[in-house]
Structure formats: structure tokens, C-alpha cells
Image (cartoon, rainbow, N blue to C red):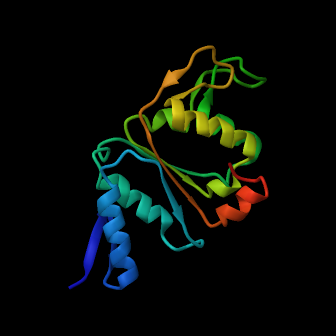
Amino acid sequence: MGTNINSNSLQIVGESPAIRTIFEIVNKSADSDSTVMIFGESGTGKELVARALHHNSSRDQGAFIAVNCAAIPHDLLESELFGYEKGAFTGAAHTRVGRLELAHGGTIFLDEIGDMPPALQVKLLRVLSEREIDRIGGTRSIPIDVRVIAATNVDIEIAIQEGRFR
């Protein structure tokens, strides 16, 4: 009989030493509000592990918002994450709530965070330290209660040395 972790409607199932280690890490980390970074090649189930962390945590009644940082053009990623106020830029006809704010009370999963532009990484670091966001064009900070789980297939140590990751 296999060991498994429920990830909402999906399950991680297996018996190998490697998968057992993942189960142990998920079980130990699920109830922490600490930021988690998941490393692995594309297609290895990083989002499944992130969902398992969320669904086995005290935040499981909150939203799980997944954002693929590599799939959204860099010039749109900031407004996707942080939202914007009406009139903040040409075409901003209404206020838009960003993904970080939508994840309030739950978890945001930032997939392929290694592809996030360095300038946006600085804003994300502020979110992690201050637990608040500023919408584009906003005049006040908005407190948020969100757990951040990030994943990448990039060698972060090399990216840091090359100045591509903070």
C-alpha cells in the first residue's frame, strides 16, 4: 500500500525514499507560515507539492492562487501581482485587485520565480518583510495575510551570482 498526501483532488503517491522525504517535508512545513522555495526541473510536480502544502495547512480554506511568472510578459507581471488603481496608467479604466491581494488568507504560488525581473523581485521582498502591498498608482499600503510558495527550475545560486535573482 502506497503512502500519499492529498492535494485537494490530486494526490501525490509513492514509496521511494525520495517521495517519502517529500511527504515528511510537506507534513513538517504545512502549518508554518514561512515562505517556501521549491526547486526542480519542469514537469516534476512543483505545483502539486505547493498545493499539498496549502491543502494540508491551516490556510486550506483560503484561496490558492497560482501565477506562472515566466508565462506573463514582464511588463504585465507587476499589475497582475499587485493590481492597480483606476487612472494609474492609460487604459486603467477601473481598479483591479492583484493576485497577491486575491490570495489574502490563503496561499500564492509563484511558479518560475527565477524568471521574475529583478526590479519586481525588490517589490516582492517588501511584501515578504512588510506583509503589505501597494497597487500601481495607489496612495496607501494594503495589509495582506498570505503565504508565499515559490518554485523554479533555475539554479538560484548562479542566478544570484549573476545578479539575476535577489
Of residue 115 and residue 95, the one placed in the foreground of this image is 115
User: Where 84 sits versus 162, above or below?
Assistant: above
Count of all numbered marks drawn on residues in the image: 0
**Residue 102: percent from the left, percent from the top?**
47, 35
Task: Specify whether 51 is left or right of 108.
Answer: left
Q: Residue at x 67, y 43 (%)?
A: 121
**Residue 153: percent from the left, percent from the top?**
62, 67
Of residue 112 and residue 25, the one placed in the foreground of this image is 25
Q: Quadrant of residue 152?
A: bottom right
Q: Residue at x 51, y 22 (%)?
A: 142
User: Where 129 sits versus 149, above or below?
Assistant: above
- Residue 7 in view (yes/no): no
Task: Specify whether 84 is left or right of 127.
Answer: right
**Residue 132: percent from the left, percent from the top?**
52, 27
- Residue 122 in view (yes/no): yes
Q: Residue at x 27, y 45 (%)?
A: 58
Q: Quadrant of residue 63?
A: top left
Q: Residue at x 36, y 74 (%)?
A: 21
Task: Specify whether 127 is left or right of 58.
Answer: right
Which of the image's four quarters has the N terminus? bottom left
